[in-house]
Image (spheres, helix red, strand yellow):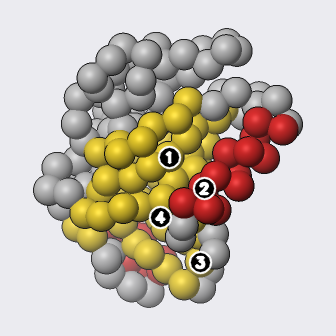
Amino acid sequence: MKRFHVHVSVTDLSQSVGFYSKLFGAEPSVTKTDYAKWMLDDPRINFAISTREGKAGLNHLGFQVDSDEELTQLREQAQKADIAAVEELGAACCYAKSDKHWIEDPQGIAWETFHTLGDIPVFGAPAVKAEQASGCCAPKLGPIPVKVQSACCG
């Protein structure tokens, strides 16, 4: 089953955790010094905030899936629609290891589809190759064919 994902960059994590905890009527399921995440069931959403980007606002949107099969299905759906994507296998992102792919909508908003494989103790890891996304934030996508333009977020 898919879960909608929203990641917002914030300037004051503590203030934002307080606000969103009141808004959602729940404390975050993950809290770190630079990151917090709520895994809500009503509505079914993975809502994350972080101070890593350097400016406040929407970081990216996406879908979290429960299986490799669902991830493959959404990747194939994008391919059939001629939507170029950047694939990341074993990405270290947001204190989790995930397989994922990224696309960009016509307005330039990054969309991430991912299957979480497990928790990790760090926010993200540096990219190994310039043509791969780092896994710590939405990659900077260029014109088709998609190429990652930067190694990591702020």
- Asked which quadrant contains residue 15, the reply is bottom left
Q: Residue 43 versus residue 126: which sits nearer the camera?
A: 126
> Which residue is label 4 attached to?
47
Considering the numbered disc 4 on the image, is that residue within a helix, a strand or a loop?
strand
Callout 1 touching callout 2 (CB < 8 Å): yes
Disc number for residue 71: 2
- Residue 16 visible in the snapshot: no
Callout 3 touching callout 4 (CB < 8 Å): no
Left of 26 or right of it: where is 114? right
Disc number for residue 59: none
Left of 78 or right of it: where is 19? left
Report the amino acid beneath label 3.
Arg
Q: Residue at x 38, y 77 (%)?
A: 21
Q: Relative to 144, does residue 62 appear above or below in the rendering? A: below
Q: Earlier in the sequence, mark 4 or mark 2?
A: 4
Residue 3 lies, in percent from the top left, at: 59, 69
> Which residue is label 3 attached to?
44
Residue count near mark 1 (Cα–Cα under 10 Å), binned few <14, some 14–19, many ≥20 = many
Q: Residue at x 59, y 77 (%)?
A: 44
Residue count near mark 4 (Cα–Cα under 10 Å), binned few <14, some 14–19, many ≥20 = some
Q: CA distance from mark 2 to mark 3?
A: 18 Å
Disc number for residue 100: 1
Q: Residue at x 20, y 57 (%)?
A: 120
Report the amino acid beneath label 2.
Leu
Q: Relative to 61, does residue 141 appear above or below in the rendering? A: above
Q: Earlier in the sequence, mark 3 or mark 1?
A: 3
Residue count near mark 3 (Cα–Cα under 10 Å), binned few <14, some 14–19, many ≥20 = few
Callout 2 touching callout 3 (CB < 8 Å): no
Q: CA distance from mark 1 to mark 4?
A: 17 Å
